[in-house]
Image (cartoon, rainbow, N blue to C red):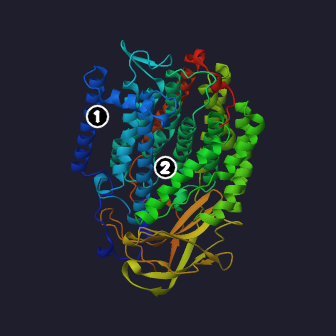
Amino acid sequence: MSRSSELVLLAAGSAASAGSTTDRPAGAAPLDQVLIATGSAAILCLALGALVLAHRRGQLTVLGTATDWLERQRWTGDLAGWAILPLLTAMLSLVTALLGMYWDIALHIAFGRDAGPLANPAHYPIMFGLYGISASGVLACALPRGDEAGPAGVQLTRSWRAPVGGVLLACAGSYALLGFPLDDIWHRIFGQDVTLWGPTHLMLIGGAGLSLVAMAILFQEGRHALAPVAGNPRPVHRYVLQAFLAGGMLIGLSVFQAEFDFGVPQFRLVLQPLLIASAAALSLVFARLWIGRGGALAAVGFYLLVRGGVSVVVGPGLGELWATVPLYVAEAVLVELAAVQLAHRPLTLGAVAGGLIGTVGFAAEYAWTQVAFPLPWTTDVLSEGLPMALAGGLAGGLLGGLLVRGLRHDLPARRTTLALFAGSLAAIAATTTNGVVESVPDDLTATLSVTDRAGSGVDEEARVEVRFDQPPVQGTPAWLTVTAWQGGASRDLRVVDLERVDATTYRTPERVPVGGSWKTLVRVQDGRDISGVAVYMPADRVLDEPEVTAKAATRPAVDEKLILQRELNDDVPGWLWGAAGLVVLVCSLALAIGLGWGVRRFSESTASGTTADDREEVPA
């Protein structure tokens, strides 16, 4: 049955209400906004290109003056100025993009789809932030002169050698930035898939998150360029800068969890512990080994400051929705404890710390979700969530250990490195795939009764009782809620757990929205089964969708994406979506492999320049 026919069935007997329609486009952006955005991007790229060429030809001294000044500052530690400027620009750009992304998600939950990309204020910090990351990579490639880029540099022209970290940073940033125009093309073909995990959305956050690996390489190249004197104590400023980069990596990898942070995930709950464990293990093992004692705790401190700060700015500051913050504190402590005995063996530490994160860390985050998250973990996630978290922790820990060994010029033999790198990526890919595989229960229907109405329009609320024709869950579900979103000016999201009356009957303990621009549905996730039952949906003139009235009715439990993603086109061949998604997947794998190549190139090309500080455990 097609999406349209299922929703028509849901709305049988309902009349479309003109007052609840929306005129916002449901597909591609208006052409005038596309032209404005494209023209603006072209102007920025031309300006950056002119700046870089003028610097390379010696016609402009402002960049050289800036890097010389930065190099003289005590707080920059022992980094070359041509590395400091791009790194600072990239980190500021990342925070800007992070702020825009969480603001954007909050706006979509409250108001639905955009009137166009330029009509959404949150898109501006995202676009400028991603452009800043790409521009930082270009600057990193352009600033070094002569042989300053070092032996790991990439020969771009006969007289231009760029640091490999700068090349990778430019690639990661450009890959993320490319997600914007491709997102519009995607919407023209498939409609607006309003989920963080849309393929082009993954390009945006994947490129930005993985850019931290490139930044770490660039940091090391900048250190080697100044040839620090052996035996000199490490400046505390370098410790702080490294903590910022490692914490930024944790922030970047945690962005994939954003739908869970808000309480409206469109995939199974078992994905959340996997994402937390893999992000924590990779980032915190890397932080502890790269920075030294206390490095994992320092990285988490920076993460909490920035990621928590973004929630405060978007929530109380801008008056939008609050996004919960995973803590990672227990995971950092576990890494620090394991490193007491294993800091001199990075891969062993990665495996042991990853195992601890996937088990003890899982238990700590399980407890935190009971306190802070709209959808706390339940025993439903244990059978799959714990093994997936363990696999993610082990894979992430090994990747973190490999990264540090690469930055220490001490990678294992090529065959061993390739096996560990490919195996870890495959483990994360396999467990992620398992997490997104889901099913819809057969022939499940629900009879709704709506009582105790109050208010009118957007303020109309009522209590809802749901009587299923068979038990909807076996044991404890991952979630069984009534979720209401897109209330507009109220800027609210309601996630209300249903109270059990008996095996087939559930009810809301309080009134829930059933009018105006709200969208309200019953959500059920039990094991692999995910389904939804519409309670109330406003009419949508653009989509030619009728209103689903909140009233006594019997409705089928359907794939909830048909309700959550009303804007998706249902007349696109399945093979086309699969082919488009495969292209994005291949490009993402190419980026990951490219970063692995960059770490290997740095490790092998600069081995002769190794200092004691690179190889030994250095007190903070």
Q: Which residue is mark 2?
A: 197
Exactly how many numbered labels are in the figure? 2
Residue 416 is at least partly visible in this image: yes
Q: Quadrant of residue 584?
A: top left
Direction from residue 11 to residue 238 in the image, left or right: right
Q: Earlier in the sequence, mark 2 or mark 1?
A: 1
Vertical comparison of 114 with 602: above or below: below
Residue at the location (70% across, 56% down)?
Answer: 364
Q: Residues within 10 Å of mark 1 (few under 14, many from 20)?
A: some
Residue at the location (76% across, 38% down)?
Answer: 340
The image shows residue 161 at horizontal and vertical percentages of 41, 18
Vertical comparison of 614 with 272: above or below: above
Direction from residue 330 to residue 525 in the image, left or right: left
Q: Residue furthest top?
A: 158
Q: Amino acid at mark 2?
A: Trp
Secondary structure under the numbered disc 2 in the rendered image: loop
Residue at the location (56% across, 26% down)?
Answer: 599
Q: Nearer the viewer, residue 25 or 568?
A: 25
Residue at the location (41% across, 46% down)?
Answer: 573
Q: Amino acid at mark 1?
A: Cys
The image shows residue 90 at horizontal and vertical percentages of 43, 38
Q: Which residue is mark 1?
A: 45
The image shows residue 184 at horizontal and vertical percentages of 33, 46
The image shows residue 116 at horizontal and vertical percentages of 29, 55
